[in-house]
Amino acid sequence: MKISIKRQYFIEQLNHCLKAISPRTTLPILNGIKIDVSDDQMILTGSDSEISIEITIPTEIDNEEILEIEEPGSVVLTGRFFVDIIKKLSGDFVDLETNDNFQTKITAGKSEFNLSGNDSNQYPLLPEVNDADSLVLSSAVLKTIINQTNFAVSLSETRPVLTGVNWNFNEDHISFTATDSHRLALRRLLDKTFNTEISNAIIPGKSLSELSKILTDSEEDVEINLSQNQVLFTYGNMRFISRLLEGNYPDTSRLFPENYETKVNVNNSEFYHAIDRVSLLAREGGNNVIRMTVDNNNVELTSNSPEVGTVNEDINASAIEGEGIKISFNSKYMMEALRAIQDEEVTIEFFGTMRPFTITPSESSEVVQLILPIRTY
C-alpha cells in the first residue's frame, strides 16, 4: 500500500473511527484502525464488537484531490497512537507506505515514523444488516431525538435493557423511550412510520451518545436499517453499526395517568434558572432535593442544607389549575428534563404527592418527561 492523503481531512475521519474503539476490548486487533485501500478509495474501520464505524474516503471531494493512490493494500494500525501521530505531523498531506510485513512508514514534512502493523485479514468482519427496509430521518431530527431521550438511560447494568433507548414502531407514529426507573424521557415522531417486521429495537445509550457526537444539525439524510440484533445508520460517507440490546423493555404506557390534580404552566428558561439557583444548596446538602409548593396562585421552590442555610424562590406561573400540592424532586433530573424540551413554555402536571409527574411542551405532546418524586418526610 502506498498513498498520500490530505492530513486535516484524514484526522477528521480518523477521529470518527476512534469513537468505536474501546481500550477494554478482549481482542487486541480491535485496538487498531483497519485501513483498506482499493484502486479508487480508502475504507477506514474501527470496532469494539458492540459499535462498528466504517468510513469511505474517495480520491476527490468537490473536485478537490483528497487521496492519491499509488498502490492499493491494507493494514491495521494501533488506533490512538496512529491518530496522535497524524495530528502532530506538519504539512497539508501525509504519506503512508506499507511493506509485505505490514511495517508502515508515515512521512510528512521532515518527519518519518515507522509503525508495526497487523494483517487486515485478522480483523473481524463487520455484522451484516438487512438494508431492504429503511427509515430516513434528517441528521438534525435524529440528533434532537437522541438529546431528548438518551440522558435518561440507566447507568446500572443490573437491568441491561434500561441502559438503552427503546424505539417502538407503531401504526401511526414512532416512539423513543428511555428510563432509569427514577425518571423517564419519551419522544414521539407523529405521522412517521417504519414498515418493518420488527416492532421495537433497544439501542444502547452508549452507541447513541457516540452517534450524536458525529451527527450535525443539518438536513442531510440518515438512513436507518434494522436486523434482529443490529442497527445500521448510514450518514454521508459513514456506516455506523451497533448491536441491539436483548430482552423485553418494560411497558411504560401505564405510567402516564390521564387526569391531573394540579397543573402549572411556566416559562422554561426562567424555571430552569430558578432551579439552578435553588439547587446550589441542594447540591451542598448532597441530595439534590428541591421542594416545590403550589398554593392558590403561587409557586415556590425551597431547599436547605443544615450546614449552609436555606433558599426560597417564587416562580412566575402563567397558569395554575387544580389543588395545592407540596412535592420534592431531584433538581438534576428536573434540569435535564427541561433542557430536553426546546419550547418556550412548559406544562407540569401533578397526579398526587407520591406519584410521578410530567413535564411537556405547553403546545405539543411530542415530548414527555416524567419524574418520580422524592419522599422527604
Image (cartoon, rainbow, N blue to C red):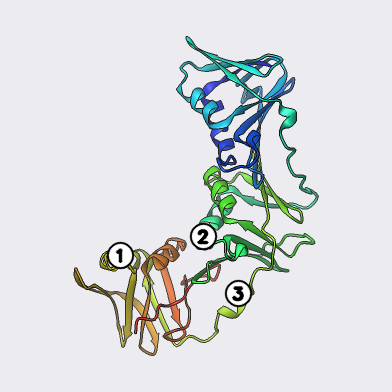
Measuring 32% from the left and 82% from the top, which residue is drawn there?
Answer: 293
Q: Which mark is in front, 1 or 3?
A: 1
Left or right: 112 as drawn, with respect to 222: left
Q: Which residue is mark 3?
A: 252
Q: Nearer the viewer, residue 79 or 237?
A: 79
Q: In the drawing, what numbered circle is on residue 18?
A: none
Cα–Cα gap, marks 1 and 3: 30 Å
Task: Name the amino acid, label 3.
Answer: Thr
Cα gap from disc 2 to disc 1, whole angstroms = 20 Å
Tell me which amino acid carries mark 1.
Arg
Quarter residue 51 falls in: top right
Q: Is residue 189 visible?
A: no
Residue 76 appears anywhere in the view: yes
Figure quadrant of the C terminus: bottom left
Asked whether the residues under the numbered discs 3 and 2 touch, taking CB atoms below 8 Å apart as contact, a structural biologist would say no
Percent coordinates x, y for residue 347 in the rendering: 43, 74
Number of disc labels: 3
Q: Where does label 2 land, which residue? A: 155
253 relative to 114, above or below: below
Tell whether 9 sits left or right of 224.
left
Give the mark nearer the N terminus: 1 vs 3: 3
Q: Secondary structure at mark 3?
A: loop
Query: In x, y percent, where is residue 288?
Result: 34, 68
Which numbered tag is attached to residue 283? 1
Mark closer to the chain start, 2 or 1:
2
Q: Of 55 and 135, which appears nearest the observer? A: 55
Q: Nearer the viewer, residue 158 or 206?
A: 158
Q: Earlier in the sequence, mark 3 or mark 2?
A: 2
From the viewer's perspective, is residue 299 above or below residue 56? Answer: below
